[in-house]
Image (cartoon, rainbow, N blue to C red):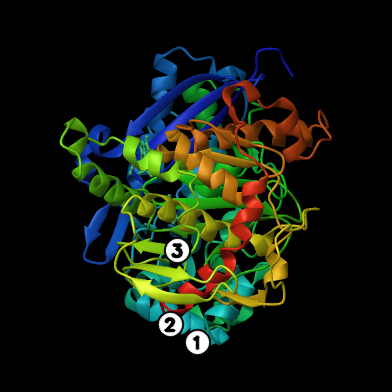
C-alpha cells in the first residue's frame, strides 16, 4: 500500500449524500456533503422525499446528480482522489430501484465516456420507474398481510427472513408495484436496493444485491442464504417466480470486492485506475462497522427514538426486532431493536419536574432535576415500576399508554395500579429503568452465557414472557453483553447513560462517543479492510482488524458503573414481564 492512501465512505441517506475520506491510520481527512433539498432544489423534494399520503418516494436521478456534485466538491478542494485505494458506503435501507432493459447498455457507456454527467448517460432511460420507494413509506399494509399469510403469520415470517413483514421492507413494496403498476413491473428488467444501485454506478455495470442489506426485504431466507421460493412466487406467480428471481439478479453477492471503479470516475475526477469498490450496505449495517463491535457487544443509540444494534452469532428472530446477516463477519448477525419512545418520553417527565420550579429551569431544557431523581439511590421506590409510552410502542407492540404499578418484591407479582407514585420524581428514575430493562431483556436471547450468577434469592423457574418469547427467569440471569457503546443525543447525559449502563450490565466496559459520521465512517472502514483482506495484506477478520486499529482515544470510557447494580435489576424482570402482559 502506498504510504498516503485514502479510503472513501459514502452515506446516501434520506436527506443528503455524504462522502467521507480516511487515511491509512483511520483518521478522517476530508468530508463533503450534498443536501438534497438545499443543493438540488429543482427536484422539489421535502427533506429528500415526495410524500403522497402514505406513499413516500425519492427521485433516483437526484442521487445521480448528487454523486457528481459531491465528487466535484472533492475535486474543487483538490483532494488527491488518485490516492483513494477503495470505496464503500452506506445507503438508506429497503428502498428499491427499478432498472429498464436498457440499463446495462447505458451503464456500459460509463466504461468509456466522461464528457457529460451521470444524468446524461443513465437517466431517465435506464429506469423503468423514476422514483424509489423510501423507508418511510407506509402504503403496503395489504401486501404485508399477504406476505405473512403466505408463510403462516408474523413468527414464521421472522423465523425465515429475520423480521416480520414491515411496510417499508422491499418485498411488500415490490409486490405493491407488481399489483398496482403492472406495466412498470413488466418493463423492469432488474431491481436493486439503494446500496447495489450505488455500487453499480461506481463500477459501471449492474451488480447483485449486497447480502446483509438483502435481509431488509422480507424475501431472504437468512439461514438458507437464498431467496425464499414461496415469497418470490407470491410476487410473481405467473412465471413460477422465474422473472422476479431474474429481476433480483439471481442471488446476492457474497464477495468483499464488487469490482474496480469505472472509467467515468477515473477520467472525470482522477480516481486511481486500481481503486476498488466494496459493496455498499445498509445504513444500520454500516453503523456497526463504524465501531469496534464484536460478538456480544451492543450499541445503544439514545436519539429521538432508542435503537439497539448488537453483534450476535445466535439466530433467534422475533417479530419485535430485526436480524440481518452481518455485513463483514461470517456466521454472525446484526440484531436491531427499534423503540419509538426514547428521548421524547423522557423529555415529558423532565418538563413536568421543571414546571414545579419558579426559576429559569421551568421553561428550559434543563435536565438537572431529572438527573438528580434518576441517580437518587434511596431505594424507596423498589416496589415501583412504570412504562411510559406517549407514542404507540414497537417493543412491546402496544398502543400509547402510561402505566404505573406497585409490585410485591418477594414474588414479583403486580399488586395494584396507581395514578401517581408517592413522589413525582420517581417517574424520572422509573422511565429510565424500564427503558433500559426492556433493552436488557430483549437482547438477552441474542447473547452468549457469561459467567455471572445472580446473588439474589429469585425463583429461577418462574416463567417470564416478553413479546413472543416465554422462558424461565433463569435464562435471563447470566446473559450479559461484553462492551456497550452509547451514542446519540441523550448519551451526553451522564445520569441516563450511567443508569442504562448499570442495567445493561456490560462486563468489559461502557463507552460513549459522538458519531456524526458513523454510517459513512463504517463505509470507509469496510472499504479499507476489504481491500487489505482481499490483497492478503491482513488476515485479521473485520472485528479484530477494527479493534486493533481503532482510534480508541476518541472514545470516552464510562468507569463509574458498579457491577452489583446489574444483579439488583434481576428482581425487576418478573414485574416487567407481568406489567407488559397487562398492556396487550
Ligand atoms: P436524532 O435521533 O433525531 O438523530 P439526536 O441523536 O440528536 O437526534 O437526539 C436528540 C434527542 O437527544 C433529543 O430528543 C433530546 O431529548 C436528547 N438530548 C439531547 N441532549 C440531552 C441531554 N443532555 N440529556 C438528555 N437528553 C438529551
Ligand atoms: C431501518 C430503516 C431506517 C433506514 C434509514 O430498518 O428503515 O433506519 O435505513 O435510512
Q: Secondary structure at mark 2?
A: helix
Residue pictured at 67% horizontal, 42% vertical: 483
How would you rate the neighbour count of disc 3 (Cα within 10 Å): few for under 14, some for 14-19, many for 20 or more? Answer: many
C-alpha distance separating marks 2 and 3 = 35 Å
Residue 249 appearing in the image = yes
Residue 385 marker: 3
120 up-or-down from 72: above or below: below
Q: Position of residue 22 (x, y in %)?
A: 58, 22
Q: Position of residue 473 (x, y in %)?
A: 67, 71
Residue pictured at 67% horizontal, 30% vertical: 528
**Which is more N-terminal, label 1 or label 3?**
1
Residue 149 marker: 1
C-alpha distance separating marks 1 and 2 = 6 Å
Contact? badges 3 and 1 (CB < 8 Å): no
**Mark 2 C-beta to ligand 2 under 8 Å:** no
Say which quarter of the image contains residue 3: top right
C-alpha distance separating marks 3 and 1 = 37 Å
Quadrant assignment for the N terminus: top right
Quadrant assignment for the C terminus: bottom left
Between 61 and 382, the one lying in front of the other is 382
Q: Position of residue 86 (x, y in %)?
A: 63, 30
Q: Secondary structure at mark 1?
A: helix
Viewed as shown, does residue 534 lie left or right of 83?
A: right
Q: Where is mark 2, residue-wise?
A: 145
Closer mark to the observer between disc 2 and disc 3: 3
Q: Position of residue 265 (x, y in %)?
A: 51, 29
Q: How many numbered discs sit on the rendered protein?
A: 3
**Mark 3 C-beta to ligand 1 under 8 Å:** no
Q: Name, please, the residue furthest toward the left.
A: 358
Amino acid at each position: 500500500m502506498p504510504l498516503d492512501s485514502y479510503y472513501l465512505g459514502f452515506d446516501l441517506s434520506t436527506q443528503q449524500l455524504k462522502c467521507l475520506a480516511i487515511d491509512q491510520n483511520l483518521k478522517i481527512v476530508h468530508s463533503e456533503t450534498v443536501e438534497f433539498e438545499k443543493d438540488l432544489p429543482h427536484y422539489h423534494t421535502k427533506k429528500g422525499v415526495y410524500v403522497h399520503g402514505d406513499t413516500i418516494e425519492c427521485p433516483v436521478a437526484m442521487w445521480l446528480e448528487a454523486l457528481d456534485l459531491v465528487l466535484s466538491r472533492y475535486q474543487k478542494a483538490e483532494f488527491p482522489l488518485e490516492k483513494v485505494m477503495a470505496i464503500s458506503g452506506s445507503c438508506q435501507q429497503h428502498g428499491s430501484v427499478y432498472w429498464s432493459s436498457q440499463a446495462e447498455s447505458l451503464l456500459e457507456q460509463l466504461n468509456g465516456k466522461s464528457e457529460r454527467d451521470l444524468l446524461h448517460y443513465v437517466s431517465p432511460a435506464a429506469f423503468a420507474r423514476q422514483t424509489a420507494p423510501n423507508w418511510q413509506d407506509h402504503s403496503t399494509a395489504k401486501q404485508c398481510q399477504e406476505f405473512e399469510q403466505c408463510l403462516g403469520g408474523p413468527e414464521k415470517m421472522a423465523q425465515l427472513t429475520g423480521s416480520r413483514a414491515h411496510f417499508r421492507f422491499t418485498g411488500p413494496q415490490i409486490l405493491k408495484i407488481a399489483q398496482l403498476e403492472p406495466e412498470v413491473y413488466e418493463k423492469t428488467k432488474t431491481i436493486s436496493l439503494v446500496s447495489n444501485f450505488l455500487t453499480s454506478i461506481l463500477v459501471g455495470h449492474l451488480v447483485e444485491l449486497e447480502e446483509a442489506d438483502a435481509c431488509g426485504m422480507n424475501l431472504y431466507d437468512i439461514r438458507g442464504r437464498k431467496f425464499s421460493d414461496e415469497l418470490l412466487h407470491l410476487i410473481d406467480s405467473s412465471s413460477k417466480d422465474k422473472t422476479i428471481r431474474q429481476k433480483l439478479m439471481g442471488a446476492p453477492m457474497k464477495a468483499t470486492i464488487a469490482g474496480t471503479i469505472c472509467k467515468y470516475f477515473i477520467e472525470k475526477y482522477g480516481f486511481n485506475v486500481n481503486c476498488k469498490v466494496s459493496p455498499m450496505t445498509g445504513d444500520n449495517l454500516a453503523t456497526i462497522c463504524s465501531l469496534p463491535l464484536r460478538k456480544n457487544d451492543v450499541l445503544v443509540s439514545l436519539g429521538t427514538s432508542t435503537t439497539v444494534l448488537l453483534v450476535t452469532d445466535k439466530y433467534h428472530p422475533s417479530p419485535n426486532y430485526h436480524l440481518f446477516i452481518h455485513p463483514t463477519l461470517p456466521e454472525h448477525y446484526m440484531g436491531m431493536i427499534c423503540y419509538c419512545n426514547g428521548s421524547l418520553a423522557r423529555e415529558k417527565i423532565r418538563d413536568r419536574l421543571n414546571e414545579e420550579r419558579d426559576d429559569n429551569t421551568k421553561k428550559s431544557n434543563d435536565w438537572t432535576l431529572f438527573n438528580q431523581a434518576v441517580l437518587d439511590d434511596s431505594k424507596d421506590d423498589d416496589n415501583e415500576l412504570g412504562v411510559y409510552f406517549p407514542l404507540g410502542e414497537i417493543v412491546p407492540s402496544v398502543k400509547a399508554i402510561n402505566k404505573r404499578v406497585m409490585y410485591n418484591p418477594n414474588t414479583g407479582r403486580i399488586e395494584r395500579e396507581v395514578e401517581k407514585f408517592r413522589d413525582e420524581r420517581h417517574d424520572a428514575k422509573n422511565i429510565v429503568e424500564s427503558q433500559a430493562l426492556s433493552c436488557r431483556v430483549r437482547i438477552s436471547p441474542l447473547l452468549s452465557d457469561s459467567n455471572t450468577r445472580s446473588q439474589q434469592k429469585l425463583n429461577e423457574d418462574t416463567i417470564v414472557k416478553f413479546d413472543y418469547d416465554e422462558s424461565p427467569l433463569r435464562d435471563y440471569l447470566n446473559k450479559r453483553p461484553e462492551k456497550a457503546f452509547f451514542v446519540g443525543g441523550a448519551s451526553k447525559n451522564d445520569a441516563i447513560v450511567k443508569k442504562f449502563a448499570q442495567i445493561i450490565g456490560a462486563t468489559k466496559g461502557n463507552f460513549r462517543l459522538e458519531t456524526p459520521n458513523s454510517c459513512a465512517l463504517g463505509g470507509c472502514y469496510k472499504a479499507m479492510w476489504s481491500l487489505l483482506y482481499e490483497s492478503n495484506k491482513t488476515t485479521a477478520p473485520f472485528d479484530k482488524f477494527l479493534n486493533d486499529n481503532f482510534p480508541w482515544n476518541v472514545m470516552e470510557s464510562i468507569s463509574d458503573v458498579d457491577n452489583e447494580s446489574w444483579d439488583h435489576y434481576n428482581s425487576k424482570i418478573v414485574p416487567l414481564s407481568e406489567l407488559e402482559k397487562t398492556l396487550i
